[in-house]
Structures are given as C-alpha cells and as structure tokens.
Image (cartoon, helix red, strand yellow):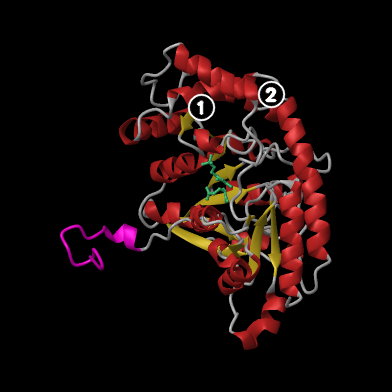
Amino acid sequence: MESLESTSLATARRMRALEPSATLAMAARAAALAAAGVDVIDLSVGEPDFPTPDHICRAAEEAIRGGKTKYTPAAGIPALRKAVADDYARRSGIATTPAQVVVSNGAKHSLHNVFTAVLDEGDEVVVPTPYWVSYAELVKLAGATPVLVETRIEDDFKLRPEALQAALSPRTRMLLLCTPSNPTGVVYAPEELAALADIAIDRDLAVVADEIYDQLVYDGRAYASFPTLRPGLVDRTVVVAGVSKTYSMTGWRIGWTIAPEPLSKAIGNLQSQETSNPCSISQHAAVAALTGPQECVAQMRATFERRRNLVAGRLAAMPGVRIPEIGGAFYAFFDIREPLGRLKSSGISTSMRWCEALLEKKQVALVAGSAFGAEGHVRMSFAAADDKLAEGLDRIAAFLEGG
Ligand code: PMP
Ligand code: GLU
C-alpha cells in the first residue's frame, strides 16, 4: 500500500503534521550501518555511554524477585514520589510534597502529559530555538501552537527578555525553557532566568522548566532550579526531570513532573487513562538511584566535563566553526554556515545535506540543526567513549578540510 491517506485507515489530521524524532531516526540509521559492519562513529543521540550503576540494577533484580511486578498506583509508587520530592527539595531548597510528583514513562512522556493537561486548542507556547526536537511536535499534538523564537549564537543561544516580550500575544499561555540546554549545552545564569521569570509573572504565563540535565553542570557552577528565582514561581511552574541522563538509565523510562498539587492530580488522572503506571521494576530502580550513593553521578559528571573540554577545544579550532560556551549537558551545537557557504558548488547547502555527506564520506553520525529549528548548525553528542570522540573529531576535521 503506497499511502494510507485515501483508505479507511487514513491517519488523523494531527498525525499528518507530526515529524518523527530526528535524533532517534539518526541513531537508528547509525545502528543499522554498524550492524552492517560499517565503522560508524555515532555522535547523534544524547545517551550516556556508561552502564547503569550496579546498585541500581541490583534494586531492579530484587524488585523482580520480590514480586514487585504488578500494577502500581498510576502516578507512581509512594516511595518514588517521596524520593523525587525529597531529592528536589534538598537540592533546590523548595519544600516539595510527594503529591506534587507524577512519575511517567520518561521525561518525554512527562512533557506530553503537561501539554495535554494544561494547553487548550489555540494556546501559544513560546519555544526558544534551537529547541529539543520533541518540544514543537508535542505542543502541536496537544492542539496548541509553538511560537518559535530565534536566539543567536552571539548571545550563547539564550532567550533575551526583549525577544520574549516581542513574541507574546493575547494567546500566549506558556513559556518552555530548557537549561542546561539540549541541543546547545548552554546554561542560563540565575539572573538571566530571573529576567524571564519577571515577564512570566507579569504576563501570567505558565512555565515548563525542563531540568533533565540539572546535575550535569560544569565548572563548579551552582544549580538554580527555575522556581527558586522569584517568589511565586512555584505556583506557575512545572519542573520536568528524570533518571535517564543523571543515572545513565535511558532505557528504564522513568521521568517525572513536579507541579502544584491540583495540576499534579490532573496529570495523574490523565496518566491513569493513558498508560497506567510506568514500569514497576524501573520505579524501584529509580528509588535506589535517588536514595542510594551519589558518587556515580559525580564520576559521570567529571567524565562529561573532561569530554566537554576536549570537544569544545577541538571544534573551536576548526576552520569556520563557531560554538557557544558549553556549560552543561553533553551536546556541542556548532555553526557551520561558513563551511556550508564554501560547499555550495558541490550541492551541499543545508545542515541535513551536510550531515548526510559526513555520514557517507566519513561515517560520523551527527544531527542536523534543522531538526532543532536552527538551520546552518549541527549537533554533536559527546556522551560517547573518549576514543570514539577523538576519532569522530578527526573525521569531522578532515571532512571540513575537504579530505
Ligand atoms: N528533555 C530533554 C531536554 C531531553 O534531552 C530528553 C532526552 N531524551 C528528554 C527530555 C526525555 O528524556 P527521557 O529519556 O526521560 O524521556
Ligand atoms: N534526548 C536525547 C537526544 O536528544 C535522546 C533522544 C530523544 O529522546 O529524542 O538525543
């Protein structure tokens, strides 16, 4: 069958506008090449390369043996909701109750839940670009409209208060912020966030603060959760986070929202109809992650910071390449407009074509900036082993030099 559109199984209108996840698509492509025996360096997907720490795996084994293999409350087991609330309260200083926490099947699901629970048809959500691939699609799925606001590499890709003001309309309902940022690795300073918070308060906006990389901040900088920046933000903010990045648990699928209690209840109700509880075994593993020893987090952070130094140094030295200051997460988002300009005559005029040519000629997988709403750039994940990173950077340098 060529297409579903004229059949009884035609997809809904909302599906026709839905793009597949470009990060997951590129990772699948790189994995298929590797399975076919190609020596591919996959720096596309943002996934820590470390094994999940042993004590967390053991907790999962115990959960299985102990019969924790049944439905749990839809919003998560009490022990995990409490562990999330306690961990957040300890690190942010904001008193948080388990009732404010809903545990979902990864932070991506948490984001989907918030948008579905809060947004009405026609509501506008301000999304600074470059943005993480799924934001715009998830907002659209909820029937709302993402309003993309461009940021500039000269500003380290940070949303400026004037740009936010200019993007507001009577329909603006929500501001979406991600710091440390995927895809740019940029970390907002507390005073920069506070300036955005003032506008959110003044214009009565809801804020979704995606803080999934909150523990991956480098150079000894302190972590400032968005609601700590001004009084009253707790009542208008949903913090989204999870265990995927902090504890190298991407496959376990545990993320969460921290929201005012009435919204949390609504999200729990939604989830009770949508998916029921996230995996019971993963929930027990996540309790061990949050309440167990935290040295593993410091170790992984130190490794990422070392890799950040390597990657930022090498990329900045490549001809025509520009990168912002990478303060956190594990991504380098670099500007290739100048190298692209040089390649025009060979038919490579977009970041997508550039990534395809890099994969074809040098077998390095990156993700095109267009997937993040920022044409002329590409994203490299440095959540990869040191030797792979070094080899990947050598190949990118050779590609840029036309070799
Ligand atoms: N938000 C951001 C900014 C991310 O990079 C990711 C990465 N996948 C997610 C949310 C979703 O994470 P999870 O694996 O928990 O669904
Ligand atoms: N967040 C990661 C990334 O951006 C994982 C892939 C995904 O969930 O899209 O690469």
Give the residues drawn in magenta, as a range: 1-16
Q: How many marks overall?
A: 2
Disc 2 crowd rating (10 Å Cα; few below 14, some 14-19, many 20+) is few
Q: Of the numbered discs in the image, which one, if any, rests on residue 90? A: 2
Judged from this view, the residue extending furthest toward the top is 66
Q: Nearer the viewer, residue 354 or 230?
A: 354
Q: Which element carries disc 2, helix, strand or loop?
A: helix
Image quarter of residue 58: top right
> Is residue 323 at least partly visible in the picture?
no
| Quarter of the image with the C terminus in it | bottom right
Image quarter of residue 334: bottom right
The image shows residue 357, relative to residue 274, as above or below, that is below
The majority secondary structure of the magenta stretch comes to loop
What x and y, as percent, mark residue 26?
A: 53, 58
- The residue at the point 44 percent across, 52 percent down is 138
* Residue picked out by circle 1: 100
The image shows residue 160, relative to residue 53, as above or below, that is below
